[in-house]
Amino acid sequence: MIEFTEQQFKDAKEKGEELYKTIGEVACPFLKEKVSFGAQGLEHLKFKRRGKARLEKDQYMRFKLLHLAPEILKSSHTLQGILATKKFERVRTNNRTETVLKLVTYYEFIAVLRRNRVRIIVKQIDGGQKYFWSIVPFWGMNEETMTRLLHDGVPEDD
């Protein structure tokens, strides 16, 4: 189990947020276009879904590993997974925010970099711009239940 103090968590979160805001866009060779690092991805690092905050240990590891995300996307020439599904998404139209059923595609890149195995998820809503959605640290398997620890394999929540 990862141990950290409240101050270490606060420092990792602040540094991670500062780094995230400086990234902007990253060119991904596999996608042959730029992946933006916008507000949605930063919010997803802190919240599992709207109004449901992630556990501190979950946020801590994501912010500690965030610096790997641009590097992995810049060097990715292969895709490890893709999921296209319909989801209700909040969209702005005519100065209103509405929840609309849209086609959502998740692209998954897995890499081992400096002894860290992580999954980077890029999200695209209905043919729009691709943007960074999440970084998922790989913790291993629960040997009793044979399930992955700390994340459940659902791109929307991971």
Image (cartoon, helix red, strand yellow):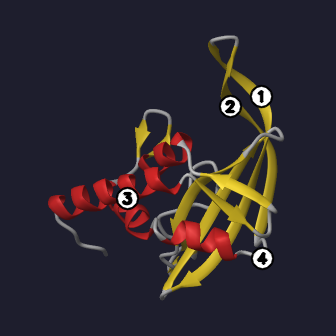
Q: CA distance from mark 4 to mark 1?
A: 31 Å
Q: In the rendering, which numbered label is found on residue 77?
A: 4
Q: In the rendering, which numbered label is found on residue 101?
A: 1
Query: Is disc 4 in contact with disc 3, using a CB cutoff of under 8 Å?
Result: no
Q: Nearer the viewer, mark 2 or mark 3?
A: 3
Q: Return the disc, 4 or 1, that comes first in the chain's sequence.
A: 4
Q: For numbered disc 4, what is the local secondary structure? A: loop
Q: Return the disc, 4 or 3, that comes first in the chain's sequence.
A: 3
Q: CA distance from mark 2 to mark 1?
A: 6 Å
Q: Nearer the viewer, mark 3 or mark 1?
A: 3
Name the amino acid type tagged 4.
His
Q: Residues within 10 Å of mark 1 (few under 14, many from 20)?
A: few
Q: Return the disc, 2 or 1, that comes first in the chain's sequence.
A: 2
* Relative side of 53 to 76, left or right: left
Residue 76 lies, in percent from the top left, at 71, 75
Residue 107 lies, in percent from the top left, at 74, 59
Query: Is disc 2 in contact with disc 1, using a CB cutoff of under 8 Å?
Result: yes
Q: Residue at x 80, y 62 (%)?
A: 31
Query: Is disc 4 in contact with disc 1, using a CB cutoff of under 8 Å?
Result: no
* Relative side of 132 to 15, left or right: right
Q: In the rendering, which numbered label is found on residue 89?
A: 2
* Relative side of 25 to 12, left or right: right
Q: CA distance from mark 2 to mark 4?
A: 29 Å
